[in-house]
């Protein structure tokens, strides 16, 4: 019986405690830098697209909300012909970011994506691409990858030795 | 023709029905305050237009009667609870002379009306033809029957001290000292019984949304559900008004006009009702019944016995 009175008193005291509510549209909550919000496609420091259309993000996606088609440009660089994320399906798990071998796909601390028309939740490549490198400012996949593209032959990447001619390896 | 009673009736109905609507907002705000939140504060200043928005929503909902329900009773049940709760206010004196019907058996009338109010819940549970609703109705009838017994008995102490069932006379008898001091046990018993009679948490076993999915009114929608809502809030106001009249001197108080004192005291008890809801868990049904019969009833009888003996010895 006394415990009931005590809990009444404890609850009553909470009337004078600090409010925990954040008055959202006026007050914004603090979001951690690694908060998993809206997905973006980043560019490397030179301004080229990082995405190499390897499809790993689409495979990793548990709700299959990513779809893309690979193509090649005149330099032989792979890039997505289209890249589409259906945000009405996306669960913001971040698996795509973890799967991405080139740091192209990244999640940002932005969640204000409400739409009145469901079709507008489907983001195309032009909606996803941003003009920056995101979380990895110095990384450039094509400069470190041992793949020959236009303007860069095999062996010319950073930290890469010139290729060895196997036929010259005589005992 | 004397229009004065009609004016009183109009004022009382206006105040009570609006109060019932505003209490929805008051309750949500107060619950939020005690849970470190703000509560509804967007619709109008301080969210004061929330009751308006809520009632517009309730009116626009589909008014659906289940095909398996007992239609006549189903429609009648929500009307009973509002009618009986409003009828009780006929004998509540808001200020000296400001009462619709100054009955000599005012207190008995309130008890009678709150007993009739049980029919609403029981019939609603029965007419819904739904197992959970029926369980809620059965629980309500058992709970009301057992808690009404010592509710009436706990009031007898006040009646002995005042020497009347008339509520105005009972208030006037508290000029020297409020009855809460000589009748403290009676006050506590009446408070507990009152919460049970109003079917408010922690005694909302008829409703218990977590076990009976809203119990007796799970099949109700639109304004029929709204009627139960309004009836519950009028019931809370009624019990609070009764407590302030019987134990806290009703309109008696210095400086302020009598009606204001009555309103302040009543509102304080409404807040206590909401605090009870915010703080206490719901007991199990067998615990509720055991409490009522094993502790409350003997205590009420003891209170009656001691009060009677003291009054007899002093006279």
Image: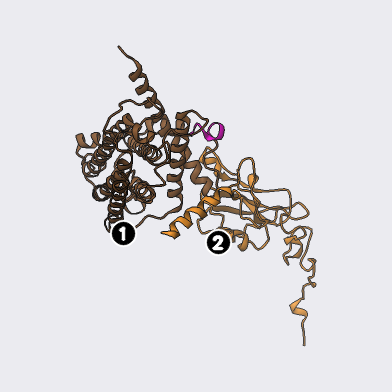
Q: Which residue is mark 1?
A: B287
The chain drawn in orange is A
Residues A21 and A31: in front is: A21
User: Does A24 sit left or right of B188 as displayed?
Assistant: right
| Residue B261, horizontal then vertical, whole percent | 47, 33
Please say whether residue B46 is one of the residues in the magenta stretch: yes
The chain drawn in brown is B
Mark 2 chain:
A
User: Does B213 sit left or right of B45 as displayed?
Assistant: left
Query: The residue tagged with tag 2: helix, strand or loop?
Result: helix
Residue at x-position 41% and y-position 39% = B244
- Callouts 1 and 2 on one subunit: no
CA neighbours of label 2 inside 10 A, class few (<14), some (14 to 19), many (20+)? some
Question: Within the image, what quadrant is residue A93 found in?
Answer: bottom right
Mark 1 chain:
B
**Extent of the magenta region:** B43-50
| Quadrant where the image shows the C terminus of chain B | top left
| Residue B137, horizontal then vertical, whole percent | 25, 47
The mark found on residue A60 in the picture is 2
Question: Within the image, what quadrant is residue B61 found in?
Answer: top left
């Amino acid at each position: 019986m006394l415990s009931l009175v005590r809990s009444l008193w404890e609850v009553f005291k909470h009337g004078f405690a600090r409010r925990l509510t954040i008055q959202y549209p006026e007050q914004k909550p603090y979001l951690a830098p690694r908060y998993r919000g809206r997905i973006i496609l980043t560019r490397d420091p030179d301004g080229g697209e990082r995405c190499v259309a390897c499809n790993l993000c689409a495979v990793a996606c548990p709700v299959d909300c990513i779809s893309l088609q690979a193509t090649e440009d005149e330099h032989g660089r792979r890039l997505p012909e289209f890249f589409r994320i259906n945000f009405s399906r996306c669960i913001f798990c971040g698996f795509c970011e973890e799967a991405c071998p080139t740091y192209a796909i990244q999640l940002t601390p932005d969640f204000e994506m409400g739409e009145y028309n469901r079709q507008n939740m489907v983001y195309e490549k032009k909606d996803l691409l941003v003009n920056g490198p995101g979380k990895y400012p110095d990384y450039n996949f094509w400069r470190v990858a041992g793949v020959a593209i236009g303007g860069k032959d095999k062996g010319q990447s950073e930290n890469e030795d010139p290729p060895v001619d196997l036929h010259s390896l005589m005992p | 023709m004397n229009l004065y009673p009609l004016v009183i009736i109009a004022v009382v109905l206006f105040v009570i029905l609006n109060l019932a609507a505003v209490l929805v907002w008051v309750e949500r705000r107060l619950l939020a305050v005690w849970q470190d939140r703000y509560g509804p504060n967007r619709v109008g200043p301080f969210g004061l237009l929330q009751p308006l928005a809520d009632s517009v929503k309730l009116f626009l909902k589909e008014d659906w009667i289940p095909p398996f329900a007992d239609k006549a009773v189903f429609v009648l049940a929500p009307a009973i609870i509002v009618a009986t709760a409003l009828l009780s206010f006929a004998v509540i004196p808001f200020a000296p002379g400001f009462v619709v019907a100054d009955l000599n058996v005012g207190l008995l009338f309130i008890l009678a009306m709150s007993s009739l109010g049980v029919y609403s819940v029981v019939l609603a549970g029965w007419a819904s033809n739904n197992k959970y609703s029926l369980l809620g109705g059965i629980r309500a009838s058992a709970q009301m029957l057992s808690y009404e017994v010592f509710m009436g008995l706990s009031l007898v102490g006040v009646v002995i001290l005042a020497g009347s069932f008339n509520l105005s006379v009972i208030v006037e008898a508290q000029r020297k000292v409020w009855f809460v001091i000589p009748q403290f046990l009676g006050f506590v018993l009446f408070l507990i019984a009152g919460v049970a009679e109003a079917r408010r948490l922690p005694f909302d076993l008829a409703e218990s949304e977590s076990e009976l999915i809203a119990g007796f009114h799970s099949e109700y929608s639109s304004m029929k559900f709204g009627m139960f809502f309004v009836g519950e809030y009028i019931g809370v106001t009624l019990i609070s008004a009764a407590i302030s009249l019987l134990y806290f001197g009703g309109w008696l108080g210095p400086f302020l006009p009598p009606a204001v004192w009555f309103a302040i005291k009543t509102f304080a008890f409404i807040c206590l009702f909401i605090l009870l809801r915010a703080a206490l868990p719901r007991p199990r049904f067998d615990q509720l019944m055991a409490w009522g019969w094993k502790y409350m009833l003997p205590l009420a009888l003891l209170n009656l016995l001691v009060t009677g003996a003291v009054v007899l010895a002093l006279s």
